[in-house]
Image (cartoon, helix red, strand yellow):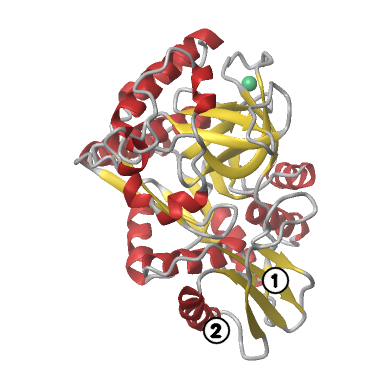
Amino acid sequence: MKLLKKIFFKYFVYYPIVLLRGEWIWSPLRLFEKSQNFNREEISNIQISKLNHILKKSQNSIYYAQLNLPKKVESLDEIKKFPFLSKETLRNKSQMLETGKSGRHTTKTSGGSTGAPVTVKKSATAMGYELAAAWRGYSWAGIDIGDLQARFWGVPLNPSMAKKAKLIDLVTRRIRFSAFKFSKPELDLYLEKLNSVQPDYFYGYTSMLNEISINYLQSERKFDIRPKAIISTSEVLTESMRDNIEKAFNCKVFNEYGCGEVGTIAHECSHGKLHINAENVLIEIIDEEGIPLPENSIGEIVVTDLNNDFMPLIRYQIKDFGSISYEPCNCGVKLPILKDIKGRAYDFIENENHEKFHGEYFLYIVEELKSKGVIIEGIQFIKSKGKINILIASEQSAYDKSTTYIRDKLRHGFSKKIEFYFSKVENIPREASGKIRVIKSEDQL
Ligand SMILES: [Zn+2]
């Protein structure tokens, strides 16, 4: 019965829907199955050919046309001479990046690691490649299209978006568990539901998977929840988090790394290495001066999307840090490995009723603000006893609009016992580690 359901969803629900959306995943899936075993030169050849297509298309965008980039490169080294694309440019000049290509596309807005949302338009073909790379990565965890997913994720704050999310969950066989606002009794209900539906795998924010695992380990009620794998995403997975999750559910955790602007970038294999989707993205690691670093050196991650000719992202600075390695992996996959990632880490913020809010809850508010045309350059939420300090880097008019909006939205979750203090700042200060933490909790109530 379980197998029949999976086959039904895969062939009669999921495939027809991606077909209708024009997101052709079959040919990339077939290619990826072979290309994961390609050597470095073969992968480079794919990257050069795709980069040349992107370069050619980019001439049609106002932004790239004025950069006078070559229409063609002979080697990947040539990209090192191209300028970087910053988040600020993407945020403020996104329309200028569009190639004017007509056709189907998806618009994605994401908060990213700095808390200032950016919007990217991605062609249906590029979406197909993105989905195919994710499914290939999940196949390393033993997961197939049609498997039942328990999703620990946000629930859109806007009612029409929430409805759309419900529909997507239905057709992609996901059961959503809100990571936005939950109390201990709610976590117990989550466990009860997981026990009764027995999902094939879990997917979610790393810190949320950790929370549910700790709750499960401490729970007096003994359930028998047996997913075959757990995929953690969006935040740094520490060794202690991995231990908690694996101990609780007695299965392996597979980490995923990516960003909203380009989709997934790397997936963990059964031997614990994050293999880069090198057929979809070209990853460079640079130092503080923007000079590309050699293998195994930690620096800033720069990504070029090799599929999105609707809005090319060439040498895009995602503001995470890591290193790249070409060491062989025992799993057999020959794709390069991403290591030492220093990406997002969120604190939960707790209200006086001991309900916890995931960091993405706050970022969804900022993303909604962007959809209303209010653009900010950065934001930070700092919770300390009895108050939340909100630092906003923006122009005065955007600051005025955003404070009213954010205050109103936060009041849904936090009573008047919690004061909100807003400050307009030049920029959001970095931690000693160099990272910007969008959500910080200096103490809990
Ligand atoms: Zn591997």
Q: In this view, does 303 lie to the left or right of 389?
A: left
| Residue 221, percent from left and from top | 71, 61
Residue 252 visible from this viewpoint:
no
User: Which residue is nearer to you in this view: 271 or 61?
Assistant: 61
Residue drawn at (41%, 35%), measured in percent from left and top?
130
Please give the residue where the numbered disc 1 appears in the rendered image: 382
Q: Is residue 4 left or right of residue 206?
A: left
**Circle 2 Cα neighbour tier, 10 Å, few/some/many (<14 / 14–19 / ≥20):** few
Placement of the N terminus among the 4 image quadrants: top left
Q: Is residue 95 above or below residue 84?
A: below
Amino acid type shown at disc 1: Ile
Tell which of 258 and 231 is nearer to you: 258
Residue for badge 2: 411
Q: Which amino acid does label 2 sit on?
A: Arg
Q: Can you tell which quarter of the image residue 156 is in?
A: bottom left
Whether residue 202 is situated above or below residue 29 in the rendered picture: below
Q: How far apart are marks 1 and 2 (CA)?
A: 16 Å
Q: In this view, does 317 lie above or below 279?
A: below
Where residue 292 sits in the image (x, y, percent)?
63, 27
Q: Position of residue 323 (x, y in %)?
A: 68, 30
**Front residue (pair 27, 150):** 27
Q: Which quadrant: the C terminus? A: bottom right
Q: How many labels does the image show?
A: 2
SS label for mark 2? loop
Q: Answer with the quarter of the image where residue 331 lies.
A: top right
